[in-house]
Image (spheres, coloured by chain):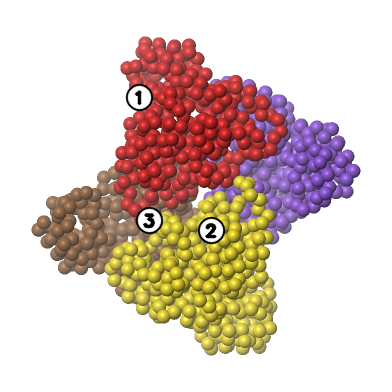
Chain colours: A purple, B red, C brown, D yellow
Amino acid sequence: MQFMSDNAAAVHPQVWAALLAADAPDAPYDGDALSARLDAAFAEVFGRPCWVLWVASGTAANCLALSTMVPPQAAAVCHRLAHIERDEGGAPGFFTHGAKLLLAEGDGAKLTPAGIAAVIDPIKRGVHWVQPAAVSITQATELGRVYTPAEVTEIGLMAQGRRLWLHMDGARFANAVAFLGCEPAAVSCNAGVHALSFGCIKNGGMSAEAIVFFDEGLAEIAGYRRKRAGHLQSKGRFLAAQILAMLEGKLWLENAMAANEAAAIVSHGAADRLLEPVEGNQLFLRMSTQERAKLREQGFAFYDQGADGARFVTAWDSQREHCQALAEAIAAL
Amino acid sequence: MQFMSDNAAAVHPQVWAALLAADAPDAPYDGDALSARLDAAFAEVFGRPCWVLWVASGTAANCLALSTMVPPQAAAVCHRLAHIERDEGGAPGFFTHGAKLLLAEGDGAKLTPAGIAAVIDPIKRGVHWVQPAAVSITQATELGRVYTPAEVTEIGLMAQGRRLWLHMDGARFANAVAFLGCEPAAVSCNAGVHALSFGCIKNGGMSAEAIVFFDEGLAEIAGYRRKRAGHLQSKGRFLAAQILAMLEGKLWLENAMAANEAAAIVSHGAADRLLEPVEGNQLFLRMSTQERAKLREQGFAFYDQGADGARFVTAWDSQREHCQALAEAIAAL
Amino acid sequence: MQFMSDNAAAVHPQVWAALLAADAPDAPYDGDALSARLDAAFAEVFGRPCWVLWVASGTAANCLALSTMVPPQAAAVCHRLAHIERDEGGAPGFFTHGAKLLLAEGDGAKLTPAGIAAVIDPIKRGVHWVQPAAVSITQATELGRVYTPAEVTEIGLMAQGRRLWLHMDGARFANAVAFLGCEPAAVSCNAGVHALSFGCIKNGGMSAEAIVFFDEGLAEIAGYRRKRAGHLQSKGRFLAAQILAMLEGKLWLENAMAANEAAAIVSHGAADRLLEPVEGNQLFLRMSTQERAKLREQGFAFYDQGADGARFVTAWDSQREHCQALAEAIAAL
Amino acid sequence: MQFMSDNAAAVHPQVWAALLAADAPDAPYDGDALSARLDAAFAEVFGRPCWVLWVASGTAANCLALSTMVPPQAAAVCHRLAHIERDEGGAPGFFTHGAKLLLAEGDGAKLTPAGIAAVIDPIKRGVHWVQPAAVSITQATELGRVYTPAEVTEIGLMAQGRRLWLHMDGARFANAVAFLGCEPAAVSCNAGVHALSFGCIKNGGMSAEAIVFFDEGLAEIAGYRRKRAGHLQSKGRFLAAQILAMLEGKLWLENAMAANEAAAIVSHGAADRLLEPVEGNQLFLRMSTQERAKLREQGFAFYDQGADGARFVTAWDSQREHCQALAEAIAAL
């Protein structure tokens, strides 16, 4: 019973259908009819013009977006636990040509204006010190927490005031929106976000993420840099197809809701162990080495979280019985 | 009737079957069972140990391979018409951190030891001049020509003598091997090639190319750099599946043979127009503007080649009737 | 008798005097009183606002300037013989993070609008092809030729029309202006140049070149990038001092005139051997191997220029007798 | 009375003499007779073969050295307060093409094996996480503290065991050796250091630092990268001259001793205010805003150190009376 990562989830049948349907000859790269529909499809989701590029990984989405915002001699602020800082093999340094990541603190891996200010206010003006050019936040965060529209807006206003770009790593954006029940725009473009890495792969996709730009100039640069990074696939229609399938009939929200509900089921057995509130499809639980061993003996797969914790992640295809079984097993520890 | 690019070809049914079969949960990234089989599968093809990484584009394959061979302060020699020089949006500069491409000449877009020497011999030793570290050749070339085993071996020996790495862009390696009827090793590892971009996408694949390293040290570096470039996809099993399907029962050779045969059919009507001998699945024909217009009126799609030429590319799924019709239409011009 | 390079010339006494005078404590980096005077000093030379940075080498000057103009995914056009292409150890690739140099042709190593167009007009729009962002010309050129105000203006207008930045490598700008007898602005800012590498080291300086920006935005970026490249020296007053000494009483023009006159003396003995007209302080002469050997036996030091030529360079401190002797020795060959 | 920075100190008369003596024609770049003497001169200082390059700034020295040790996809460990992390405008990211700096803790800005281990031990093997390739320590540290031979040796052994290169930022190496009274080798090459940035500029030089490599392979790479970074000055003899003058008659140690003694004089009046022991030429004192204002009124110039502290730096040319006056003024606060 698999609770290691939503990366391991299956591809959704509607995505498969879209992939198979895309197997007709069309113009290569992003010159095909499906890729051409992406801007409009996202414009409908966000209620405003969007410029959208597909790429094959969240790392590529995040780092390409950042590379349009942060010149080599500048820096981006992110949380100390951000995926771009901890888990992307130095990709931000590659894509930005050596720009810095400035690490801020904040509960639940969430940034706040105060946390950002604590990092950038001490930076003196002048060429000796790397100046910030952007902020990157993760929605939902690496600890499963969700920014409210008000919280993103606060950061957005601060970024605007300091002339910083705002990027959102939305590998689990769908789970966050499903949890909030708000308009997608309310926690992104309307709140000051300039580029959103819109995750599909963890949410039923196979190999496509979308970078949704709310700024045309950034998107144009990104087009050149995507090619230069080897991310302009020649049969791009298969990436566009996946993303369009996710948007069709709001599949992205449905899948996220299913994953969130699966997490909620698990959390019923673990209320007294929660290291963080469950706001999406990730659970972080206090759990001793022996307890973890016991669960694994029963066939549950999951990651350790530090010395005394465990991380469980559900996905759109998590089976209710597995979740129920896990909840009971935890309760019985 | 489509003769623009083999990039536009359909995905082969066996590749689809492999993709669908791969849709069971497995470890993410390249920790899955399919990815684990790649080294052995290619070892069988090449008769010696191989270290293999999947990536999503030929550009990524070529440039990742080069980045393991060419330090930023050095250079790679390639043909003036090489894809890495002309059509990859500056990707070699990105992946190698600014190394140079030194452009050599040669008939049919083929390099020769003499052509390489003409470029590197005048380079004085010393820090003022960028020193060569690698040679990159394309098999089959950008003009549809094929290196024989003897020709690659000559280059391989020269590279060895000069302590240069040798990379082969094999986006159409299958077509070349099918044309030559030789062992794959005879025009690659046995001839001195250290890394081969083994193309699948133009040959019936969807979104996976293989970088086949014949040197373990290069492969280890490439692993880190693939992640850093955002090319380590989280559901990597779908890339491995495609590549394994291509190798299964030598599908890669079968598809290439079909494409080559399709080109041969077309060439029957164009013998007096050939700008280059047809050695694979590409035809370069002398053809005036009016003649091209006439063909296009009849429904044939293809690219111009300079002012007085045209390029036609066949693929594994080119229909015999279309090829026959094209041959006749050209003959009738 | 030294005719190898103006790099080997002595430091002018007025520069020494300025260096010694600068040895009073002052603020470090470029916060000192001398550095603060640079903008105004050049504004007087060029008759308009300038933003000036000192650096320690022509390579740094050229490449820092280019790095503010050419994003990593773009290209600069230069002559095939340009110093940035041939003699800077790949520095442009380093400073621009892998941007390309597009090589144009032109007599005397001079670019023309037609030569530039021949390189950039065939570049298709779109992300597959590296797009030009700047043009770099050398005044005087690597073959000792000088652009007239009209010639620079033609290039400047073309650059403006194509939205390209225009950089001038002026390692021997002084010699060119001395030859032309024009206002410095007439072959730089007034002709469309946005940044000028203003050479001092070959002209009596020790270790300082000036980058003169005619665009404030470029200069601001250059400030950050100079620090990042380790070129913001802590005792910057010694670089500013040298440059101010060069401008004081037009020493830069005097020195260049002296060097040009020395070259003219040499040319009197070599009129029938000139490979290029002598327009500054460099002579390129037809000369056989045996003839070169004969001159060297007589104590003249100089570089070969290809198989059948020789390059002689004079400097501000070339001795008249040496030049006269060389002229006679050549005439006697 | 100047106590802001040893950067502001004058150039020593023996350095001036060497500069003036170097003003005879010689081969350009580092082909001159003075540059050729550097390796041997340092071999004498360190009692073993050395490969030495001059550069014009400490930033260039540190970052060039690191760039030979740390591939773009890897990391260097340094102290959170290290100059390369805090004060070099992102230069390490530029020279290493985006490698990471991993920040460790340690009293007095000194690293320890335990502090290094705390940073690198949690890094999992594998491509998702940036792997360490080098350690960089500063001697004396940014808080004026000095590593003993035993302390460097401990770090050297750890680095060896982990296959990490060891770099030493020795902007104030002379002050450290003068304080320790040991052989220079005992805190560098004999203790496991592979490359040392040997500072001259703060110690009576004008514009030259030496990178002393104890590994020939690293030095060879550095030669190419120095050129590529625009740091191979054409009149390099003037840099070599400064460095040789510093070594001549152990001027480097004499100057450092003078600076250290000056700091000792100041410390006599400040024993109860020391934030760090005085081990070289820097003093970090507890001091309120009002107290600092009072000192400044009396003509003392220095930097604040946080909200309640002050930094005073002496140099080889600090005047005894000024130091005495400062000591008394502090005591009288």
**Secondary element at tag 1:** loop
Mark closer to the observer (1, 2): 1
* Spatial CA span between label 1 and label 2: 50 Å
- Amino acid type at circle 1 is Glu
**Secondary element at tag 3:** loop
Classify the position of the N terminus of chain A by image quarter.
top right
Q: Residue at x 24, y 49 (%)?
A: C306
Classify the position of the C terminus of chain A by image quarter.
top right
- Amino acid type at circle 2 is Pro
| Label annotation for residue B127 | 3
* Spatial CA span between label 3 and label 1: 40 Å
Neighbour tally class for label 1: few under 14, some 14-19, many 20 plus, Cα within 10 Å: some
| Label annotation for residue D92 | 2
Q: Do marks 2 and 3 share a chain? A: no
Mark 1, chain letter?
B
Left/right of residue D180 with respect to residue C99 in the rendered view: right
Q: Residue at x 74, y 41 (%)?
A: A4
Taking the image as drawn, is residue D7 in sight?
no
Mark 2, chain letter?
D
| Label annotation for residue B276 | 1
Residue D279 falls in image quadrant: bottom right
Mark 3, chain letter?
B
Neighbour tally class for label 2: few under 14, some 14-19, many 20 plus, Cα within 10 Å: many
> Among all residues in the image, which is located at the extreme right?
A332
Residue C280 falls in image quadrant: bottom left
In the image, A319 versus B272, the foreground residue is A319
Q: Position of residue B127 (x, y in %)?
A: 38, 56
Q: Residue at x 17, y 52 (%)?
A: C289
Q: Do marks 3 and 1 share a chain? A: yes
